[in-house]
Image (spheres, rainbow, N blue to C red):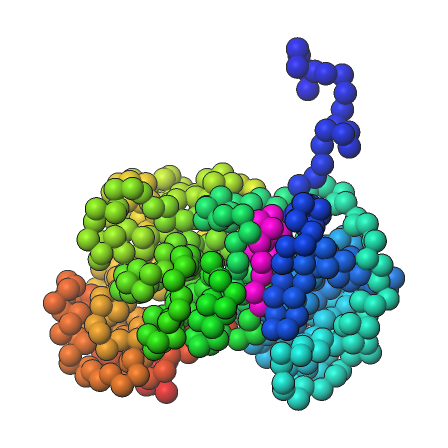
Amino acid sequence: MSGIYDTGLERTAANFAALTPLVFLDWAADVYPQRPAVVHGARRYTWTQYRDRCRRLASALEAHGVGPGDTVAAVLANTPEMLEAHFGVPMTGAVLNAVNTRLDAPTIAHILDHGEATVLLVDREFSGVVRQALEAASVSPLVVDVDDSEFTGAGERIGTVEYEAFLAGGDPGYRRTQPVDEWQAISLNYTSGTTGNPKGVVYHHRGAHLNAVGNILTWSMPRHSVYLWTLPMFHCNGWCFPWTLAANAGTSVCLRRVDAREIYRLVREEKVTHYCGAPIVHKMLVDAPAELRDGIDHQISAMVAAAPPPASLIAAMERIGIDLTHVYGLTEVYGPATVAAKQDAWADLDLEERARANGRQGVRYLLEDAVTVLDPDTGEEVPADGETMGEIVFRGNVVMKGYLKNPAATQEAFAGGWYHSGDLAVREPDGYVKIRDRAKDVIISGGENISSVEVEDVLYQHTAVAFAAVVATPDPKWGETPRAYVELRDGATATEHELVEHCRAHLAHFKVPRSVVFGALPKTSTGKIQKNVLRESARSSESFQ
C-alpha cells in the first residue's frame, strides 16, 4: 500500500492470520474448558476433551502420511466422530469429504475415486454398501471402522483399525497446521447428482469461517446454545454448524436418525434450544402426538431450508411454539446464504400473512456480499415488483472455490462475476427474494409460465395433503400442463376431483393441475422431494407408484 497509510511493514504473523474455523476450537477449549461440547447417549465430552480427541485424530492421520491437499472421506452418522473429523482432518491441512450415507455403492465409489481419498472413516451401519464401493473403486484408502455404542446393528468391520484405537496412537498436544492462506480447501461436498455423477464442491477456510460466524449473527444465537443434530453433517458440512458450535461454545447433541419421539425426548432432557432441517423434519414434529411435547416449556428455535416451505407449515410451527427461521442456499454457497429476516411490523400481521412473509427466501446473510435476481437474457437486475422473474445469483466470500476437476462447469457457474443458482425468483417491493421455481421446473403451458411452487403452495393449504409436487406433463394442445403428485396425511382422504376444485378456487384456471397422482413421494436423504423422478414419470405418462 502506498501513500500516507504505508506503514513500511508488510503483513506479519503479528498482524495478519488467514481466516479459518479451526481457531474456534481452541477458543472454546481455552475459555470454557469444562463446559459440555458433545452429548451422545452415555458419551459426554467437555471442550477440553473434545479438543484432545480432535488433536489425536489429526496426529494419527499425519502419522499415516496425511497432509495438505490430501482427502479424508467419512461415511458417518451424526456422531461425535463426525464432529471430530470437521476439526481433526483440516488440522493437518487435509480436506474433509463427508459422504452422503444414503448413496448407492457406485456413486460412493465415484466420489472416493474423484476425490482421491487416502483415508476413509466408516460407521459400521454403512459398512455393507461401503465394502461394495471399495470393491468398485480404484483408490485403496486406509479404512478406519467407527463403532458407535448407540448403534445396535450388526454391521461388519471392514477396516484395518478401529477408530478409538486409531485415536489412541495420536497426540493430544498436537499443534494444527495453519492454512497457507484462507483460500486453501477445507472440505469437499458433492451435489445431489440427479443427472449423471455428482459434482464436487470445494469449500475454503475463509468461507467456512465466515459462514460459521454468520450462522450465529443471523440466528441471534445466545452463547452456549444447545444444538440438536437433526440436519445431516454430510449435507454442506451440516450448514457449517460443527464450526458454529465451537464459535458459540455451545453443545452438540448427536442424533443418529430423525425420529419425532427421540427428538422431543432430547429437547426435553438436554434442554435443546436450536435445530435445523428440511421441511419434512419440521412437519414430522408438527404431526407428532401432542403428548410428546409434554414437559417442554423452554424456547426452541428452528431453521428450515431446502424446498420453499409452504405457509401452512410455518403457521403450524408457530402454533406449537417453535420459532422458525427460513433460510435458503445451495451446496455451492456453504448451505444457508439468505434469510427471511423478520421485521417488527410482521408481528401485527395475521398468522397466515406472517407465515407468507416468513416463507420467502429473503435477504443476504450478513457476511455474504450480495444476492440479487438477474434477468437471464440481459444480465440486469430485475425490478422489485414481485412479478418479474429472473435467476438468483450470489457474490462474496461465502461462495464455493469451484467444482473439483471441472473447470468448464466452474466457469459456467460463475459467468458474469456471479454464482448462478439455477433458481428462478422475483424481488418483492421490500427487496426480499421469493423463489418461484427451479429453471427446469417452470411449466410452460400454451406460452404461459406456471410456477410449480405456487401450485404446490395451494395444494398444501388442503388439510388432507402431507406432501405435494407439481411437474409438467406433455400435452398435444398446450405443449405441457401441470400434473400434481400428492402424498396424503395418515388417515386422511381426498379425491382427484376434490383437489382439482380446491386449486381452481385459488388459482387462475390455466395453472390448475389437469391430473393428480396419489402415493408416497420419492425423497432424498435430506428430505427434498425428487422432482426429477416425478418429471420422468410424467414424461412417460405412467402413474408413479
Asked if one can make out residue 275 in the rendered structure from this viewpoint, the answer is: yes
Report the residue at 26% width, 46% height from top.
Answer: 346
Residue at image location 63% in from the left, 85% down from the top: 152
Report the label total. 0
User: How far from the left and from the top, in percent, is residue 490?
Assistant: 30, 83
157 left or right, relative to 28 = right
Residue at (36, 56) in percent of width and height: 323
Residue 279 position by quadrant = bottom left
The single residue placed furthest to the front in the displayed view is 295
Residue 242 spot, x, y in % from top left: 60, 57
Q: Does residue 430 appear left or right of residue 230 in this picture? A: left
Q: Where is residue 80 in the image (x, y as percent from the top left)?
A: 65, 66
Image quarter hosting the N terminus: top right
Whether 346 is among the magenta residues is no
Of 276 and 447, the residue lying toward us: 276
Q: Which residue is drawn at 63% across and 62% down?
A: 38
Residue lying farthest to the top in this orientation: 4
| Quadrant (top left/top right/bottom left/bottom right) for the C terminus | bottom left
Q: Does the magenta stretch include residue 252?
A: yes
Name the one closer to the observer, 397 or 444: 397
Span colored in magenta:
240-254
